[in-house]
Amino acid sequence: MDQIAYVNGSFVPLTEAKVSVLDRGFLFADGIYEVAAVLEGKLIDNASHLARLERSVGEIGLALPETVERIQEIQRELIARNHLVNGMVYLQATRGADSGRDFAFPKDVKPTLVMFTSVKDIVGAESAKTGIAVITVPDLRWVRRDIKSVALLAQVLAKQAAAEAGAGEAWMIEDGKVTEGGSSSAFILTKDDVLVTRQNSTAILPGCTRKAVVALAEERQLRVEERPFTVEEALAAKEAFVTSATVFVQAVVTIDGKPVANGKPGPMTDRLREIYIDFAKATAQ
């Protein structure tokens, strides 16, 4: 059976889903995206993702073609039509297609809204048991990383470098400090049992899973410090991990080929993963 996608008001087979070659998302990366996880057929922490969507489109003056409530209805309809049990729903909104290619915002053009699903066993992923290797790369991105833009070339290059090195993620480095992963937020656990992750600013994307993990850690009286950290600090840490909607909480066991602690997932990372999965299942909608 063909997978079903949503394109500008219609549910269509994914193989037939199309937008104009003049769409500004294609020509200028003039658009915003979101990815929400699905567990047991339900959306995980979706209100946080939709709030971030609204913030991102607001930052670039892009009016969504549907209300957030309608977008959530479409997400659920896609889950149902695709019989999705575990995986993700991808959403992309662009400024739409004009009659030509001009840098300035076009007038009287309806934004494009595209959504589709993909299957992934996030909870049962083998890498959650073994941990992943990380490499470091220079952070080549623009200065408004807090906007979840579809302009992802720097991240593509970072993730490709990681793939070529046999690593699961790339940590991007700026001014000697880790900003974040190519598609994840970065954490370490210090020798003093303090969880450290970079504070939200225009330098990083405000991760929805990161936000939830920080809140869940603080609820359990764990010490959390929001500040930048270096690769040297990470290699000296008791544990390191990443968070995202597509991996939840995942241990980092090596950085640039050097082990973090004993080179295995640590107990705090494993426990935070369990706590997050419990939260996800309890709050799924």
Image (tube, helix red, strand yellow):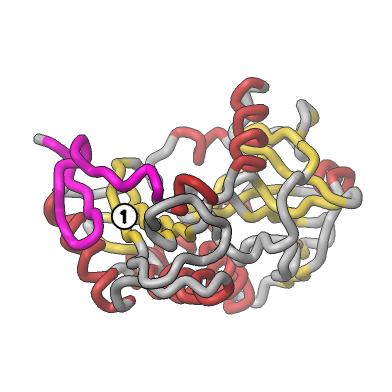
Q: Above or below — where is 68 with respect to 83? A: below
Which residue does the image show at 45% across and 33% down from the upper left? 126
Q: Percent x, y for residue 75?
A: 25, 62
Q: Percent x, y for residue 181?
A: 66, 47
- The stretch in magenta equals 2-22
Which residue does the image show at 81% across and 46% down from the upper left? 173
Q: Is residue 9 magenta?
A: yes
Q: State whether residue 179 appears in this view.
A: yes
Pick the front one: 71 or 264: 71
Q: Percent x, y for residue 137?
A: 77, 37
Q: Quadrant of residue 221?
A: bottom right
Q: Above or below — where is 45 with respect to 186? A: below
The single residue placed furthest to the left in the displayed view is 1
Which residue does the image show at 34% across and 51% down from the upper left? 88
Whether residue 90 sits left or right of residue 274 in the image: it is left
Q: Is residue 231 magenta?
A: no
Q: Quadrant of residue 142?
A: bottom right
Q: Above or below — where is 172 with respect to 52? A: above
Which residue does the image show at 89% across and 44% down from the upper left? 232
Pick the front one: 154 or 169: 154
